[in-house]
Image (cartoon, grey):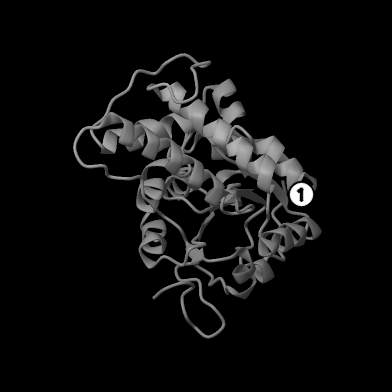
Amino acid sequence: MTPIHDLRGLGLPESISATLFDLDGVLTDTAAVHRRAWKLVFDEFLAGRGHGAFWPFSDEDYLGYVDGRSRADGIREFLKSRGITLPEGESDALPGEPSVAGLGNRKNRLLLSFLERDGVHTYPGSVKYLSALRAAGVKTGVVTASANAAAVLSAADLGRFIDVCIDGLEIARRGLRGTPAPDAFLAAAQALDAKPEQAAAFEDGVAGVTAGRAAGFGYVVGVDRDRDAAHAEALRRSGADVVVTDLAELGKVAISADRAEPQLPDGRAPHRR
């Protein structure tokens, strides 16, 4: 793919020819729905164990152990943080069964019920950004651990912008490692006929940013929707070239020749405080 050379107005280096987006929290606001479903599942499980004081699942737990990971990996990582190990269970385990599969099935059932009831909402700034990329002739893809990506993209009417989708189902089918490993990002870049240095990743999770950097991508954008200074700093430490609270901010980012310090028009580094 020939690199596009008119991306400065989109806050991207000239060398970028493919853009790869996480879905939940970057393009759609379903991250909040995922977080709510996970909290219900884990709080039910932890409260039911009756071992000492009840320590509920927190936003920090979601960002540190679950966000950006596959359903099963997120369960394993969070439970490990609490010193808990569960059997894997069968794929058709009853929702809520004390196994990795059972908790995962419970979470997925809750998520689908929330989406059916409330629908899927997109971030206006993300839709405009995707539209601008399409107008500039830049290929776009989605990389997500979600197994419900196709349904979410359809419900949100975002499929018209997306050239390739590497989701949880495709990751499992190909036997790829989940984030923070770079496998899924590299597979998506290859599907778009782009070398890693020609690709940009857009991620709201530390694991996803780590994966984009490990893939050797030419640019990595961290998205901090909650304006959480600690999370923004964690995204930077994981390898984000810039951290924004909305993709609409990227049009205001001036990229220096060496991209060492992206800046807003007033000279500030984006989202540094």
Q: Is residue 194 visible?
A: no
Residue 141 placement, left or right of 260: right
Determine the residue positioned at 47% across, 80% down.
Answer: 268
Q: Is residue 174 visible?
A: yes
Near-viewer residue (11 or 31): 31
Determine the residue positioned at 62% across, 37% down.
Answer: 113
Near-viewer residue (241 or 228): 228
Q: What is the tally of numbered marks visible in this picture? A: 1
Residue 199 placement, left or right of 157: left
Rendering quarter of residue 130? bottom right
Q: Say if 94 sits above or below 75 in the image.
A: above
Q: Which residue is mark 1?
A: 161
Give the farthest residue toward the left. 52
Residue 71 placement, left or right of 15: left
Give the farthest residue toward the bottom. 266
Determine the residue positioned at 54% across, 78% down.
Answer: 264
The percent coordinates of residue 219 (x first, y second) are 53, 56
The percent coordinates of residue 231 (x first, y second) are 39, 60
Determine the residue positioned at 59% across, 41% down.
Answer: 143
Q: Say if 119 sits above or below 250 in the image.
A: above
The percent coordinates of residue 36 (x first, y second) are 49, 46
Rendering quarter of residue 96? top left
Quadrant of image for the C terminus = bottom left
The percent coordinates of residue 27 (x first, y second) are 64, 53
Q: Secondary structure at mark 1?
A: helix
Crowding at dot 1, Cα within 10 Å, few <14 / some 14-19 / many 20+, comes out as some
